[in-house]
């Protein structure tokens, strides 16, 4: 790949000039996955060119946007409660405009304008470049909506405005959409089919972040391992590509290596993986480069083959075990985390026990665990009855969470009396005398501040722990600092 000329300083000056000229204020909130938070940074960049600077004060805003999630009903209810708060502010400031972005906007479309009377515009995840036109409509006193899903849009040509940043870590979006039609998931319907971003623009963004002092990036996608650049277009259309396009295509393992080599001192993470797409060459690339963090988030959703089939997950319990064994063999010092759903339709007690036994086999470092939440429009909602009583769902979830706590404690205790490298990200939430950061394995560590500062890579001797946090004392700067 040809060397990319870094023009970050010129771009930074243009952004600063725009901020000085902007007079309108944007308040933006994000809920749900990391992709939503990344998308909000893209929206802020687009609106910066339209005269908006971001504000942390809701009452000062000319435009309020909420970037929404539809993955669970609880997330949607949280957004509706926030809209009630906006409504109270709008009574005081009737000129304030309110917009709904993201997956919930895509799912509900015009229904949002009918149900939530304070909402002035509704914008889906692929339509953010249309915001200037939509705002012009709103300024003329008309409601505005654009939720059309794109087959090409990746926002690869937009430099995000980093929101609420610590100046150390940043998201870099590499793919959009998902082709895996899991029966419980609304994402394919709200974000469309998989398409990948030009690797040149990705490396340009990575270089820019490094030159601005960032020390860690997370490559983002609904399914990062299915990244495939062959000149543009949907991943499903790769079969139609020319022989030249196929020969020069860049897959995720190659992109990971390109990023690692472009900035050898930049920490690199990625999320999220799907078991059927995480290939051995990705794991081998992780092992090859020290700056690729040794953590894999690997959602399994269930330990039962029968339930996995009902979910339309494209892996089996046995295939998942084989993948775990390969990760342990190639990356013995890696951490593995999970997503699990309790109480999927038709789940029996034996299916639940299969999930617990899978957890016993893997012994995850940490995880994200939920009860099944029926989402309108999904195959499970259309074809399956949500037949597991809520008390059974909650009991099974409690057993999963308790087992995960036990495994997390085992994993963190393994670090006692060892030295780990930690990137300082912020003050500890519990004490302003301590720093908080993460290890390569994505485990939080806290320690006394001493002479160190945010952004430093330090070696920390671990002397104590909880099930989720390492506790220790910094003994010097890392050689990678």
Image: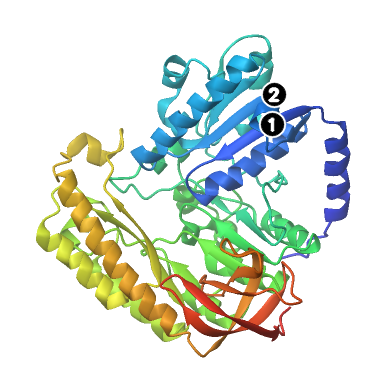
Q: Is residue 145 visible?
A: no
Whether 409 is drawn above or below 418: the answer is above
The answer for how far apart the CA atoms under marks 1 and 2 are is: 6 Å
* Discs 1, 2 touching: Cβ within 8 Å: yes
Where residue 164 appears, as percent x and y from the top left, is 67, 48
Q: Who comes first in sequence, dot 1 or dot 2?
A: 1
In this rendering, does residue 387 appear at all?
A: yes
Residue 440, x across and y down, in percent: 56, 75
Residue linked to disc 2 = 62
Classify mark 2: helix, strand or loop.
loop
Identity of the residue drawn at 66% across and 69% down: 433
> Residue 267: where, in percent of width, then height?
64, 70
Which class describes the residues within 10 Å of circle 2: few (<14), some (14-19), or many (20+)?
many
From the image, which quarter does the N terminus lie in?
A: bottom right
Identify the residue at image location x=13%, y=42%.
387
Give left or right: position of 420 versus 466.
right
Residue on which disc 1 sits: 26
């Amino acid at each position: 790949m040809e060397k990319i000329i870094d023009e970050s300083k010129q771009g930074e000056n243009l952004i600063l000039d725009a901020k000085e000229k902007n007079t309108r204020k944007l308040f933006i909130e994000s809920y749900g996955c990391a992709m939503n938070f990344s998308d909000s940074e893209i929206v802020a960049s687009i609106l910066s060119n339209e005269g908006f600077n971001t504000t942390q004060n809701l009452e000062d805003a000319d435009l309020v946007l909420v970037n929404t999630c539809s993955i669970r009903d609880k997330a949607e209810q949280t957004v509706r409660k926030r809209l009630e708060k906006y409504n109270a502010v709008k009574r005081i400031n009737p000129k304030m405009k309110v917009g709904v972005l993201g997956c919930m906007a895509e799912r509900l479309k015009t229904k949002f304008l009918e149900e939530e009377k304070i909402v002035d515009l509704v914008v889906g995840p692929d339509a953010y470049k249309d915001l200037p036109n939509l705002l012009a409509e709103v300024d003329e006193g008309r409601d505005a909506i654009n939720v059309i899903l794109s087959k090409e849009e990746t926002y690869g040509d937009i430099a995000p405005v980093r929101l609420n940043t610590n100046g150390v870590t940043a998201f870099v979006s590499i793919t959009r959409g998902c082709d895996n039609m899991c029966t419980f998931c609304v994402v394919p319907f709200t974000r469309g089919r998989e398409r990948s971003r030009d690797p040149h623009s990705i490396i340009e963004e990575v270089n820019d972040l490094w030159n601005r002092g960032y020390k860690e990036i997370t490559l983002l996608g609904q399914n990062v391992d299915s990244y495939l650049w062959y000149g543009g277009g949907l991943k499903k259309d790769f079969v139609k590509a020319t022989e030249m396009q196929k020969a020069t295509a860049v897959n995720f393992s190659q992109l990971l290596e390109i990023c690692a080599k472009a900035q050898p001192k930049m920490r690199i993470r990625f999320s999220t993986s799907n078991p059927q797409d995480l290939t051995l060459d990705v794991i081998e690339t992780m092992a090859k480069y020290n700056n690729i963090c040794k953590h894999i988030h690997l959602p399994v959703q269930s330990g039962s083959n029968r339930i996995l089939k009902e979910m339309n997950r494209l892996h089996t319990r046995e295939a998942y075990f084989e993948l775990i064994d390969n990760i342990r063999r190639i990356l013995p010092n890696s951490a593995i985390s999970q997503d699990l759903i309790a109480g999927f339709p038709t789940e029996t007690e034996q299916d639940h026990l299969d999930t617990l036994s899978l957890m016993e086999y893997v012994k995850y470092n940490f995880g994200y665990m939920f009860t099944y939440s029926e989402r309108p429009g999904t195959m499970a909602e259309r074809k399956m009855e949500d037949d597991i009583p809520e008390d059974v769902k909650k009991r099974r979830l409690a057993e999963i969470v308790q087992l995960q706590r036990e495994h997390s404690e085992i994993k963190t205790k393994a670090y006692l009396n060892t030295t780990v490298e930690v990137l300082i990200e912020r003050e500890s939430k519990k004490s302003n005398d301590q720093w908080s950061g993460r290890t390569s394995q994505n485990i939080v560590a806290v320690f006394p501040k001493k002479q160190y500062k945010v952004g430093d890579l330090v070696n920390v001797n671990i002397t104590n722990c909880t099930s989720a946090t390492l506790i220790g004392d910094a003994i010097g700067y890392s050689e990678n600092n």
